[in-house]
Amino acid sequence: MQKKENKVGIVSRNSNISLLSLYDRLKATENIDQCGAIVSFIGIVRGSTNTGKKVKALHFETEKDIALVRLQKIRKKLLEKYKEVKDLIIYHVVDDVEPRAEIMYILAASSHRSQAFQSVKEAVELIKSEIPIWKKELREDESVWISSHSEKK
């Protein structure tokens, strides 16, 4: 069985984390035999803004220790709420990330698909509202802080 601390993470773009590595970790869960569904969400960087400006990369910053504690709390909350979900893995990438590259991974293993989908959807919303991750668009003509959990330091 994997250690609990391996179920959430804040990693750099150059880490060895991938959908396949996290899927393998989820499949190693002690009670995976009780599961009939694995649902995953992968957030990626868009290559243009909502107004059509080209994005060279997104730059993500966080207070890693705080973010990890909050990710653990989100994971715990969702596992308590969705009783059929047997395991949940949440990872977010920081630093500079180019278009098409992955920035967020959420995977849920559940007895049935319904709670797997619900838990993954709720995890995305909670991460966006509760994790202190600041995002800057690096565009061809300028760099702009576009969103944050709280004010940029």
Image (cartoon, rainbow, N blue to C red):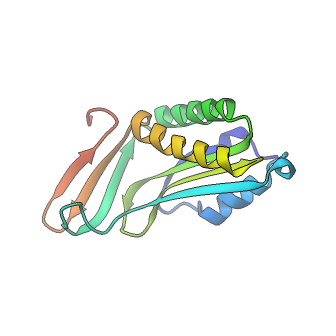
The part of the image, by quadrant, that contains residue 87 is top right
Q: Can the viewer see residue 64?
A: no
Q: Position of residue 23 (x, y in %)?
A: 69, 59
Residue situated in front as seen by the camera: 118 or 74: 118
Direction front: furthest residue: 114
Q: Quarter holding the C terminus?
A: top left
- Residue 38 vs 99, above or below: the answer is above
Residue situated in front as seen by the camera: 11 or 144: 144
**Residue positioned 55% across, 49% down in the render:** 91
The part of the image, by quadrant, that contains residue 44 is bottom left
**Residue positioned 85% across, 48% down in the render:** 34
Q: Can the viewer see residue 150?
A: yes
Q: Is residue 31 left or right of residue 53?
A: right
Q: Position of residue 35 (x, y in %)?
A: 80, 50
Q: Position of residue 10 (x, y in %)?
A: 51, 47
Q: Is residue 114 left or right of residue 125?
A: right
The part of the image, by quadrant, that contains residue 25 is bottom right
- Residue 93 vs 62, above or below: the answer is below
Residue situated in front as seen by the camera: 106 or 137: 106
Q: How many marks?
A: 0
Q: Position of residue 130 (x, y in %)?
A: 43, 33
Direction left: furthest residue: 141
